[in-house]
Image (cartoon, helix red, strand yellow):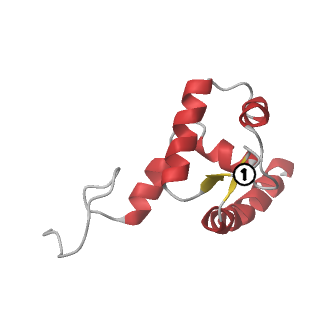
Amino acid sequence: MAKEAGESRVRGSRTGRPIMALLDLLGRRWSLRILWELRNEPLTSRALRAACDEASPTVLQARLTELREAGFVELGEGGGYGLTPLGRDLRGTFMPLHKFAERWKKS
C-alpha cells in the first residue's frame, strides 16, 4: 500500500493508522494504570506511584512522558499530574469497559 501524501508514520504502525499507534501506547506497561488512577483527580508523582503499586519510578516517569507527549496527561501548576481534555475524553471510552468488567466479575 502506497503512503498517501500528508500521511505520517506513527510508532506501532507501519501503515500510519492512528488506532495502531494508540493501541501501542496504551499497551505499554503501566500506561492504562496511570490513566485509570488519574481518572478522578490529579495526583503527585509520589501518590501516583503509590496508586500504581510502587511501580518503578523510572518506568513510571517514562510512561508519564509518553502520555504527556501524546496529549493525554499534563503536569499541573501544583505539581500533580492530571488528565487533559483529550485524556478525559479517552477516560470516557474506558467507562463502558469498566462497567462490563464489573458485570463480568459477578458472573
Give the image quarter of residue 99. bottom right
Q: Using residue 51 as the reference point, say whether residue 89 is left or right of it.
A: left
Q: How many residues crowd mark 1 within 10 Å: few (<14), some (14–19), many (20+)?
A: few
Q: Residue at x 72, y 43 (%)?
A: 79
Q: Which residue corresponds to mark 1?
A: 77
Give the image quarter of residue 46. top right
Q: Using residue 8 as the reference point, say whether residue 2 is left or right of it.
A: left
Image position of 5 with respect to 58: above or below: below
Q: Secondary structure at mark 1?
A: loop
How many numbered circles does the render carry? 1
Residue 79 can be seen in this image:
yes
Task: Residue 10 in the image: state x and y as whole percent.
Answer: 32, 57
Check the image and name the residue furthest to the left: 2
Check the image and name the residue furthest to the bottom: 5
Of the pair 95 and 81, the residue shown nearer to us: 81
Image position of 74 with respect to 95: above or below: above
Q: Using residue 10 as the reference point, say whether residue 28 is left or right of it.
A: right
Check the image and name the residue furthest to the front: 77
Q: Residue at x 59, y 58 (%)?
A: 72
Residue type of the residue flagged with mark 1: Glu
Of the pair 106 and 69, the residue shown nearer to us: 69
Q: Quadrant of the N terminus?
A: bottom left
Task: Residue 43 in the image: state x and y as whole percent.
Answer: 77, 44
Residue 27 can be seen in this image:
no
Of the pair 88 and 43, the residue shown nearer to us: 43
Task: Residue 75 in the image: state x and y as whole percent.
Answer: 65, 49
Task: Residue 68 in the image: state x and y as whole percent.
Answer: 55, 51
Q: Residue at x 16, y 69 (%)?
A: 3
